[in-house]
Amino acid sequence: MSTALRLKTINAIDFIGKSFYINQDNVELTYLHDSKIKKMKTTDVSLFSVLTYLSKGKQICSGPYGSGKTTTIEAVASIFESFPLEIVSEALLRCNPQLTEEKMLGRPDLGALNKGIEKVIWSYFSLFPSNLIDEFNRMGEDKQILLLDAIDRGNFKYLNEMIKKNGATYATTNGLDGGNIELLPSIEDRFSIEVEFVPAIGFINYINGAKKIISDENISEKMREKIKKNNSLEEVLELQKEFQSKRKELVFSLEEKEDVFREIDEIGISEGARNYINYVHCEAGFDSQNGYKGQPKNDSRNHDLPYLMNSLKNKSGLSPRWLKAITSYSKSLAWLKGEKEVSPETIKAVLPYTLLHKLKPEINLERGVLETNKTSNAKKICSQIHGRFMKDMVHFENFAGLMKNNSLALEKKLEKINEWNESHHPMFAFYKAYKLKEMTGDYGKA
């Protein structure tokens, strides 16, 4: 594991937090350096915006106007894609109700069409490795759906041509007003996490000075000429290298990024972390009134507890996309901390942000209004889940010991499990069913 690359990434997070999203530090990053534990105070915005890039994830950046959403994602893209800020800004899709598919993705090459050749002139947005969408919820539902496949699978298709991308996606959204709407549920589900931006209070704005560090009009102009000539980014690699070499302490080279992605991919997931993920997944499928979806109702085992399903917008539970998100972001954070495998503590740190956009708005009973601090609400719900998980750990350990007892026949194990189903926490019963699926290939045997 490269210490130099981890420290460079941590320095980038610090730079973004001090130069672009200027706000109060609200998270502490603990990481290993020279066999010693180091700590850095930063913002969740700068940390998770970088984790999204490392995870090739999809992030909703929500918050009021002027809170630093667009500026932050442009800075992340410039530092990690090795493009000057000017080109990054031109690759940003600025949404409005009048946008058409041609303005978003590409347009026909009329010169080629006059010769009977069908050819696409791609937009900067389609060509740029990361997807940057500004004020996404300012577009109507019919326009949002045009980007569904691009966000979901990285397929940018126009006419009979297609660009396939595998980079990160960032979309900023503003609070509802007369000019925007909610994101479609199908679009929202494609996003891995949501990070809430808040306006900076009591800080002097140094952003204009910081922008100069990752700007270069001379290189940008040369890039524009090559992109226009070739309708691709294929011939700008040398210019990317030139831009990176001038700022090598901050901007990442292609080789450095490949090494980072490879190292993150090699991070393991501990048994405790897997238990935590499975536990949350089970809670999302358990209704305290009606029991577990797909299982017979048994009121005697239902409890009046605030299980996760009660707080979700979608009562169908968490999709496989959530499993991918919690795993990939946790591996990226574990790498950043210098750990060889994901721990339950790392899952705990990432979990609220993977659920933020999936939770119902919280009603503040004392004030009689919707709770506007979505992050605080998500952390409160996740804290309750963590408390239930820790309480049930003894049952997990007993179950793990039972399943590892090779001298006991599977039928005897199932008899023991059926006894536990009547006496233990209901979520544990369905966790056991989940694990039995792995061992027997049949949920029904639980």
Image (cartoon, rainbow, N blue to C red):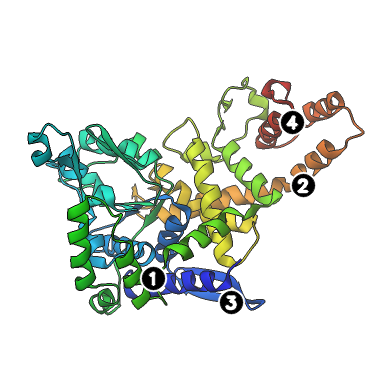
- Provide residue 101's location: percent of width, then percent of height: 18, 38
Viewer-side label of 3, 1 = 1
Question: Label 3 near label 2: C-beta < 8 Å?
Answer: no
Q: Is residue 249 left or right of residue 180?
A: right
Image point (60%, 36%), residue name: 282
To which quarter of the image does residue 88 belong?
Answer: bottom left
Viewer-side label of 2, 1 = 1
First in sequence: mark 4 vs mark 2? 2
Residue matched to label 3: 38
| Marks 2 and 3, how far apart at CA | 32 Å
Image point (44%, 51%), residue name: 56
First in sequence: mark 3 vs mark 4? 3
Q: Which mark is residue 394?
A: 2
What amino acid is labelled 2 in the image? Val
Residue matched to label 4: 439
First in sequence: mark 1 vs mark 4? 1
Viewer-side label of 2, 3 = 3
Question: Label 1 near label 3: C-beta < 8 Å?
Answer: no
Above or below: residue 88 compared with residue 353: below
Residue matched to label 1: 251
Q: Which mark is residue 430?
A: none
| Marks 1 and 4, how far apart at CA | 47 Å
First in sequence: mark 2 vs mark 1? 1
Viewer-side label of 4, 2 = 4
What amino acid is labelled 4 in the image? Met
What amino acid is labelled 1 in the image? Val
Front residue of 170 and 176: 170
What amino acid is labelled 3 in the image? Lys
- Provide residue 192's location: percent of width, then percent of height: 43, 47
